[in-house]
Image (tube, rainbow, N blue to C red):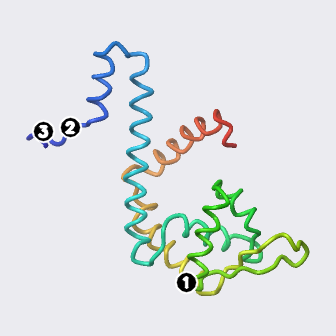
Amino acid sequence: MSNSAGPRDLVAQARENWKEQGWADAASGMAATTSIMRAHQILLARVDAQLRPLNLTFARYELLMLLSFSRDGALPMRVIGERLQVHPTSVTSAVDRLERDALVARRQHPTDRRAVLVVLADTGRKLAMRATRRVNDHVFLDLGISRAAADELTDLVNGLRRSEGDF
């Protein structure tokens, strides 16, 4: 519920509660973590709202874009998992759905009989570009913060990612 001053910042309230409980040293970290997680929810909802009408999830969209950026529009399943940093089961599930929708096809690797290539179909490339226009126009071009702030935020989050060995 909001008052005449506008909605309450629940993360700020949680930070104050943390301090009142004697956890002041952890309050900033809790607030940062909670803020990032809430921002993730907000951004994912915005992206999903753009992809859903195209019958795409973010995971399938990422896979289509990864293939579209590859030199030949094809990558081995293993490489897809590594680049998207997801479990092989998740890759298989996404490829199954994209293949059912005729957006990608599986092909035997020409030089490695054990490997399966995922090949981007023309319909997949067109859908990926259409989805990108929607996400660019309705999410990436207007995050609700300036471009400079977005760059600064990226740098800050990259520091956390780097400290955890993400790259």
Q: Earlier in the sequence, mark 3 or mark 1?
A: 3
| Left or right of residue 132, residue 77 in this image | right
Q: Earlier in the sequence, mark 2 or mark 1?
A: 2
Q: Nearer the viewer, mark 3 or mark 2?
A: 2
Name the quadrant of the N terminus.
top left
The quarter holding residue 45 reads bottom left
Q: For numbered disc 3, what is the local secondary structure?
A: loop
Q: Residue furthest right?
A: 111
Q: Nearer the viewer, mark 3 or mark 1?
A: 1
Per the image, the residue denoted by label 2 is 8
Residue 139 badge: none
Q: Amino acid at mark 2?
A: Arg
Residue 167 at x, y = what percent? Answer: 70, 43
Q: Is residue 34 visible?
A: yes
Q: Amino acid at mark 1?
A: Asp
Distance from Cα at disc 3 to Cα at disc 1: 49 Å
Q: Residue at x 26, y 36 (%)?
A: 10
Query: On screen, 129 above or below 62?
Result: below
Distance from Cα at disc 3 to Cα at disc 2: 8 Å
Circles 3, 2 touching at the beta carbon (< 8 Å): no
Q: Amino acid at mark 3?
A: Ala
Q: Residue furthest top?
A: 22
Query: On screen, 97 above or below 17?
Result: below
Residue 5 badge: 3
Count neighbours of disc 3 (C-alpha within 10 A) and say few if under 14, some if 14 to 19, many if 20 or more.
few
Circle count: 3
Q: Residue at x 44, y 71 (%)?
A: 51
| Left or right of residue 43, residue 7 in this image | left
Q: Residue at x 70, y 63 (%)?
A: 80
Q: For numbered disc 1, what is the local secondary structure?
A: loop
Residue 66 at x, y = what percent? Answer: 65, 67
Per the image, the residue denoted by label 1 is 101
